[in-house]
Image (tube, rainbow, N blue to C red):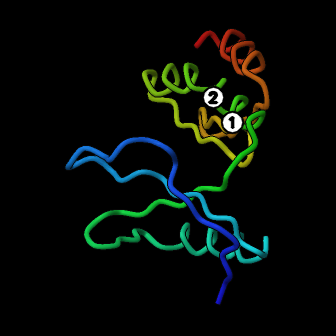
Amino acid sequence: MFQIERAHRIPGGKPIPGRPPRAILMKLLSSMDRDMILRRARECSSIEYQGTKLLFFPDFTRQTQEKRRSFIEIKKCLASKDIKYSLQYPTKLRVIYNGTSQFFEKLQQVLDWMEQLGI
């Protein structure tokens, strides 16, 4: 059994019917509990409560969020070219191209790689 130190909703108005509910932030007393919850959530194909799908994400620092956000446009570009990618924890972009994986920590690295391959 895990212990929650505090929990609260993200500020904002009441969600529109048919839209997902607001996010909830939870601070657990143990980081091991947090890791276990995130691991179990990944292992389950889907978690639902009263017909609403629940998603679990670690809370990132502002710096980490900004780094992850820097990949948004390049992810759209990769998707438009049917190139598979995923964002790895905490801020690495994994690109799968011609059966091999490339890992990038900075946007410029991805752009240079794509230019080099003529993508």
Q: How many marks?
A: 2
Residue that mark 1 sits on: 65
Q: Is residue 69 left or right of residue 116?
A: left
Q: Which mark is residue 109?
A: none
At 59% across and 56% down in the image, what residue appears? 57
How far is mark 2 from mark 1, CA to CA? 6 Å
Which residue is the site of mark 2? Answer: 69
Of residues 12 and 111, the one nearer the viewer is 12
Percent x, y of residue 19: 27, 47
Mark 1 Cα-neighbour bin, 10 Å: few <14, some 14–19, many ≥20: few
**For the residue labelled by badge 1, is the local secondary structure a helix, a strand or a loop?**
helix
Residue 28, position as x, y percentages in the image: 71, 71
Q: Nearer the viewer, residue 112 or 116?
A: 112
Q: Amino acid at mark 2?
A: Arg
Secondary element at image label 2: helix
Residue 32 falls left or right of residue 18: right
CB under 8 Å between discs 2 and 1: yes
In the image, farthest residue toward the left: 17
